[in-house]
Amino acid sequence: MARRKRTIGIDLDSLVEKPRTELVEIWQASFATGAPRGLSQAFLARLLAYDLQVQVRGGLGPRLEKRLLSLAGGEAPKPAAPKLKPGAQLMRTWNGTTHRVDVVDEGYRYREKTFTSLSAIAREITGTHWSGPRFFGLVSRKKAL
């Protein structure tokens, strides 16, 4: 697959060779605002190349953007349970009894009853609130904290 080197009529590879004054002009023409002050020529070139590519190809995906914002705010991101496909089976032994859950199109099947969440099944089994994905070992406690 050939790599595209041109975005909005600008050769991105040559941006690092341009003087800062020219980079500021490209920035103003592209974004209708002044370039950030105090940035080195090399960093301004890289920032300009990234922003021009975002204009053409789009930015970060919503999941990645949410995770980065969470990390920047000092919050640990919540672990995502793996997506389970219909036909998968989960098993958990609780108080000496092995419990089996089947993943179906409508949700989860446990003892001939369909549930919409694993947490509801974990509550049914234990009688208390549990994270369903954690109860069935899909997310570790260490990651959940």
Image (cartoon, helix red, strand yellow):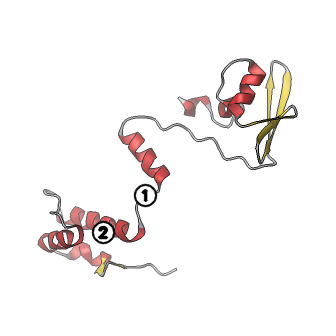
**Residue 33, numbered circle:** none
Q: Position of residue 109 (x, y in %)?
A: 81, 37
Disc 1 crowd rating (10 Å Cα; few below 14, some 14-19, many 20+) is few
Residue drawn 71% across the image and 34% down it: 118
Q: Can you say whether 130 is above or below 82 in the image?
A: above
Disc 2 crowd rating (10 Å Cα; few below 14, some 14-19, many 20+) is many
Measured in 3D between alpha carbons, the distance from the residue under mark 2 to the one under mark 1, in whole angstroms, is 15 Å
* Relative depth, front residue between 38 and 54: 54
Callout 1: helix, strand or loop? loop
- Residue at the far right: name it: 112
Q: Amino acid at mark 2?
A: Ala
Q: Position of residue 12 (x, y in %)?
A: 31, 75
Disc 2 designates what residue? 49
Location of residue 113 by image quarter = top right
* Relative depth, front residue between 47 and 9: 9
| Earlier sequence position, callout 2 versus callout 1 | 2
Residue drawn 37% across the image and 79% down it: 5
Location of residue 75 by image quarter = top left
Comparing labels 2 and 1, the label whose residue is closer to the camera: 1
- For residue 2, side relative to residue 93 (left or right): left
Q: Can you say whether 38 is above or below 54 in the image?
A: above
* Relative depth, front residue between 108 and 40: 108
- For residue 72, side relative to residue 122 (left or right): left
Q: Position of residue 70 (x, y in %)?
A: 41, 40
Q: Amino acid at mark 1?
A: Leu
Residue drawn 44% across the image and 78% down it: 3
Disc 1 designates what residue? 60
Location of residue 60 by image quarter = bottom left
What is the total number of numbered labels drawn onto the structure image? 2
